[in-house]
């Protein structure tokens, strides 16, 4: 993504990990790599999750039955789905009518499902606006914008986040969900 930090160090680091064996053999390199600021490089976290999830000791700790899965890969496109839901609106309306609160959020740099599409989906519900657009903050900085609707629905944007907002802005998303769970305004 154009707004992501340069992660050239991650690519150089990845080249040293071309053949995976055991996580503990890589641990020394992973720890020393922390000085490169991997938290800003999602690719580093993707690779780390692959190493972690495919480690025998981790799978054993998670009670994954040996031989039940092949190599774990993030965002696999080879999943067989039994059910396909073409329209989630009836489910949302049903839960809303029962009094359940909902938090809907979008990264404002999401190119997969732009926040404008989420807004169009919300408009189709015909809920009244209770609290119009206003910024929500984390540590004194604008973290996004929010709007509250009838039927106990809150919509929030996450400033600078892409499709999986917590991946791009983990601190902001943690603050958002914590406030929402504790019934505080964003």
Image: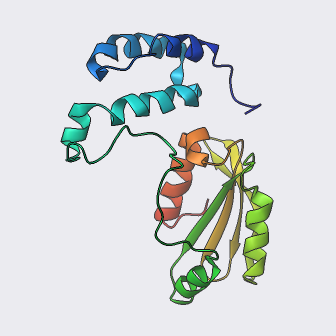
Q: Is residue 152 above or below residue 144?
A: below
Q: Is residue 41 left or right of residue 111?
A: left
Q: Is residue 42 visible?
A: yes
Q: Is residue 78 left or right of residue 145?
A: left
Identify the image quadrant of residue 154: bottom right
Q: Name the one closer to the observer, 33 or 16.
A: 16
Query: Which residue is depicted at the point 19% across and 41% down?
Result: 61
Q: Is residue 131 visible?
A: no
Q: Is residue 4 above or below residue 75?
A: above
Identify the image quadrant of residue 3: top right
Count the labels in the image.
0
Quarter containing the C terminus: bottom right
Query: Which residue is depicted at the point 62% across and 65% down?
Result: 104
The spot of residue 170 in percent (x, y) is 54, 41
Q: Is residue 145 above or below residue 151?
A: above
Q: Is residue 41 left or right of residue 25?
A: right
Q: How is the image coloured?
A: rainbow
Q: Is residue 54 left or right of residue 43?
A: left
Q: Is residue 36 above or below residue 44?
A: above
The spot of residue 109 in percent (x, y) is 75, 45
Q: Name the one closer to the observer, 126 or 63.
A: 63
Query: Which residue is depicted at the point 72% across and 48% down?
Result: 110
The spot of residue 124 in percent (x, y) is 76, 80
Query: Which residue is depicted at the point 78% across and 76% down?
Result: 123
The spot of residue 72 in percent (x, y) is 39, 40
Quarter containing the N terminus: top right
């Amino acid at each position: 993504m154009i707004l992501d930090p340069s992660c050239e160090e991650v690519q150089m680091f990845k080249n040293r990990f071309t053949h995976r064996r055991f996580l503990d053999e890589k641990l020394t390199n992973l720890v020393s790599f922390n000085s490169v600021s991997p938290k800003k490089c999602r690719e580093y976290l993707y690779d780390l999750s692959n190493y972690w999830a495919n480690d025998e000791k981790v799978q054993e700790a998670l009670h994954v039955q040996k031989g039940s899965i092949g190599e774990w890969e993030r965002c696999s496109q080879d999943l067989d789905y039994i059910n396909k839901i073409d329209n989630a609106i009836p489910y949302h309306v049903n839960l809303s009518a029962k009094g359940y609160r909902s938090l809907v959020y979008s990264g404002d740099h999401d190119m997969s499902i732009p926040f404008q599409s989420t807004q169009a989906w919300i408009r189709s519900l015909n809920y009244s606006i209770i609290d119009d657009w206003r910024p929500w903050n984390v540590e004194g900085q604008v973290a996004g914008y929010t709007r509250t609707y009838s039927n106990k629905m809150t919509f929030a944007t996450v400033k600078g986040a892409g499709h999986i907002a917590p991946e791009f802005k983990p601190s902001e998303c943690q603050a958002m969900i914590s406030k929402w769970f504790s019934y505080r305004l964003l």
